Image (cartoon, rainbow, N blue to C red):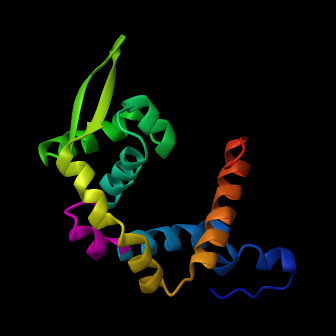
Amino acid sequence: MTTSVDTAQDEDLLLEHQLCFALTVAARSVVGAYKPVLEKLNLTHPQYLVMLCLWETSPRTVKNISAALAQEPATISPLLRRLEAAGLITRRRADGNERALAVELTPEGAALRQQALNVPGTMMERLGLSREQVTELHASMMGLIAATSGGSAS
């Protein structure tokens, strides 16, 4: 059965006009483009995000990493176990809070940052984007995050 689109409102329901569809495909495509670049670091994309957090500040609590990545601690914990098994991080009870788990870079994990410095430039080249375009896209995405979470994006 073939239907025709008569009105702008009908056009709004076309798959190609759906923001959610474009974002889903774009996210999957961009993460996929990272895969061969991150394989050289022996990291998956989710592990790379955790390492980015830790390269900014180490040690951090699991709760802090989870908040920074907008992920549940239960999602982060398996990543941390694999990063620890790879010798890139350590996990221990946080000083002064026996219930909190502190995550800290090992010397190997800290040294990996040097290799990771090439990732953003490589990805801009792979995606054909300038630094300015990446900044604009990031700002747009953070605006969407803020709009859907009811909070403010930074």
Residue 8 image position (x, y, % from top left): 86, 79
| Image position of 22 (left or right of 76) | right
| Percent of width and height locating residue 74 | 35, 34
Q: Is residue 38 magenta?
A: yes
Residue 5 position within the rendered picture, expressed as x and y whole percent measured from the top left? 78, 85
Above or below — where is 136 with respect to 54? below
Residue 122 lies left or right of residue 68; in this view the side is left
Residue located at (27% from left, 76% from top): 36
Q: How many marks?
A: 0
- Magenta residue check for 99: no
Q: Quadrant of residue 43?
A: bottom left
- In which quadrant of the rendered image does the N terminus lie? bottom right
Q: Which residues are magenta?
A: 34-44
Given residues 18 and 86, the one toward you in this image is 86
Residue 34 screen position, x and y as percent: 36, 72
State the residue at coordinates (34%, 60%). 45
In the displayed structure, would residue 58 be above or below residue 112?
above
Q: Residue at x 61, y 65 (%)?
A: 138
Q: Quadrant of residue 72?
A: top left
Query: At 84% across and 74% down in the image, what residue appears?
Result: 9
Q: Quadrant of residue 33?
A: bottom left
In this view of the protein, which residue sits in the foreground, 28 or 50?
Answer: 50
Left or right? Give the position of 79 relative to 121: left
Looking at the picture, tell me which residue is in the foreground, 130 or 77. 130
